[in-house]
Structure formats: structure tokens, C-alpha cells
Amino acid sequence: METNTPAIHVALAFDKGYVTPVYVLLASIFANNRASRLQVHAIATDVPAPEKEQLVAYARQQGGNMHFYELSPEVTQGFPVPGPDEPEAYITLAAYYRLFFPRLIPQDIERLLYMDVDMLVIGNLLELYQTDLGGVAVGAVLDTEMPSRAEIGIADMNDYFNSGLLLMDLPKWRAERISERAIEVIVTLADKLDYHDQDALNVVFHGGWQRLAPRYNLMKAYIPHDLAKRDYAKFLADKVIIHYNGRNKPWHRACENKLRFLYPLYLHQSPRARMGRYLPKPLTRDSLVKLIYSRALETYFNYPEIGTVWRRAKGLLGK
């Protein structure tokens, strides 16, 4: 590969329960960014060394590289995480690891694209990676589903970003001590941080962040509820990163995201292709009812003729 090929530095943080989704995310990154040199930086504290070695070998096989960094468990001791019976139980201490990349990676790297591992890359990352941040330390996408966060000093929810994707200007991030200030918020407001590191970062930036287009962090809220299957290709044409935010991921049977069909496409391109698509997760009665409703609504919009027949039948029955 030519040395003048542009380099893109990507950061991932995960634990051993997410190794398969990481392979799938990596497969999607490499498949859609062949013209760039991908350097993946990772913190995965409880992933066994042989597993890390296999991930590195896969990245190199794909023409990139992967670098793991060690993080002492003591640095996140006492950080709040949901209990096993709480709705957000899927969030682990790994959610905080993104705060430590600026300290750990080589100082000559000036830009870092952090991504949550419940994402898929379906387009070229270079334009995003080279985005002008307008002199601020981070670029991110507005999170439109957040409730009021007045208890942590955020009154305007039009200034609240999703931390699943962060385009970091590392020199500026370090100069402004963003990580240190976020950790201070985590320690002092632990009982008020419903969304953990995301809340803390929003408190620190307080609106002083660069807005990125939703196509770079396509959360569920940005997918039209009436999007029909026949329109998926047109809708996805300019999208770059899909984010399966929420409790149920595309590796769960209860996933409600319309774009869950993309996950197995990249799973089959990864070294985990022979593994089953779904990871075990028990369905409660409430979640089953919600899933049935979601699937019925999806079918309604995917096949408009069904809706036409149903409306006619209701009209006839009403006479």
C-alpha cells in the first residue's frame, strides 16, 4: 500500500462480551474504506491476550493494524454503572474507556474517531475524519431522544450530543483537560448521571462542540418510522455509520431497529461468520409485546397493500 494513502485513526472500547460485534464492526470498516490506512486503537481490559492477538491479526490481514492499550482497573473504580436488573444493564465500565484514549495513544496522532461497538460503517470515513471542527475539541451528533437534563445543568437539549461517535481533536482535547474535567464530573455528580460518560462530557462541553450530520451517527430516532423496505436503499445512499443505540442490538432477537438486516451481512464477512447471529437474551412479557407491535408496524409500512386491505375491511365492518 502506498505511503501517501490517508490514515484514519479509529478508537474502540469494549469488554469480552462484545468481541463478536467488534469483529463485525471491523469487517464493516475495512470493507468500506479500502483506500485508507486504518489504524485501530482499542482498550479491552478483560479480553484474553490470545483473543487480542487474533483481532490484531485480522486487522493486519485486512490491510490495517490494531493496537491495544492497558488501563488499570483502579482508574474507573467507583464509576457508576447500571445494576444487572436496570434497563441500561448493557452499559459497562467500558463506556468510560473513551475518556482515556487521549492519554494513552501516541502524542503525534492529532485526530481520533471514537466509535461505540454497536455501530456499523456502511460508507467512507475519510470525509468525516477530515471534517473542520471549527476550533473546538470534538465533533458529535445531536441526540434527539434525551429527556430534560436540568439536574446536571443542561437546560437546552438541542445542545446535547450522543457520545457513541466522537471526532476528537486530540491536542485541543488535552490542552482543555477534557478527560480530567469529565472524570471530575463523574465523581462529583455520580448519582445524577443517568447516561454516565455521555452526561459528563456534555456537562464539560456545555454546547461548545461541533455538530456533525446525523448520517455519521444514524441513531434510531433519525430513521423515519414509516420508512418502507422498498425505500431502504435510497435512504441509506448517503449514510456512513449506523448506530444501534438502545437496549436491544441487532445480535438480539428483540432488536426493533429497521436496519438490523445490515448486521448479518457484515457478520458473514467477519471471522465469526460461522457463529450464530443471535446472542442469548431472555425476553420478558413486556418486551415480547413491544416486539410484536414493532414487527407488526414494520410490516404495515413495508407492505402498503396490507394497510389498504385492512382499511377496506374496517370500512366494510363499520357499515
Image (cartoon, grey):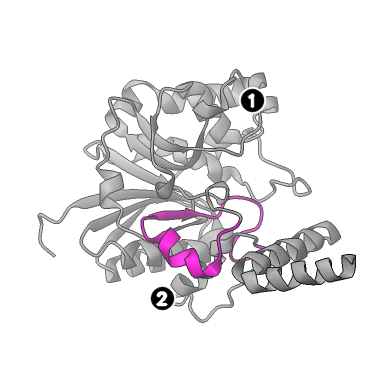
User: Between disc 2 and disc 1, whose residue precedes?
Assistant: 1
Quadrant housing residue 235: bottom left
> Looking at the rendered structure, which numbered label has been put on residue 219?
none
Residue name at image x 26 percent, y 34 percent = 132
Main secondary-structure element of the magenta-colored stretch = loop
Amino acid beneath label 2: Gln
Between 150 and 80, which is closer to the camera in this rendering? 150
Q: How far apart are marks 2 and 1 (CA)?
A: 41 Å
Which circle, 2 or 1, is nearer the viewer? Answer: 1
Name the secondary structure under disc 1: loop
Between 279 and 298, which is closer to the camera in this rendering? 298
Crowding near pointer 1: few (<14 within 10 Å), some, many (20+)?
some
Residue name at image x 71 percent, y 61 percent = 294
Amino acid beneath label 1: Arg
- Return the residue at label 2: 269
> Magenta includes 246?
yes
Left or right side of 265 for 290? right
Between 51 and 41, which is closer to the camera in this rendering? 41
Residue name at image x 50 percent, y 70 percent = 230
Image vertical order of residue 259 relative to residue 61, above or below? above
Left or right side of 73 for 252? right
- Return the residue at label 1: 149
Image vertical order of residue 312 relative to residue 5, above or below? below
> Magenta includes 75?
no
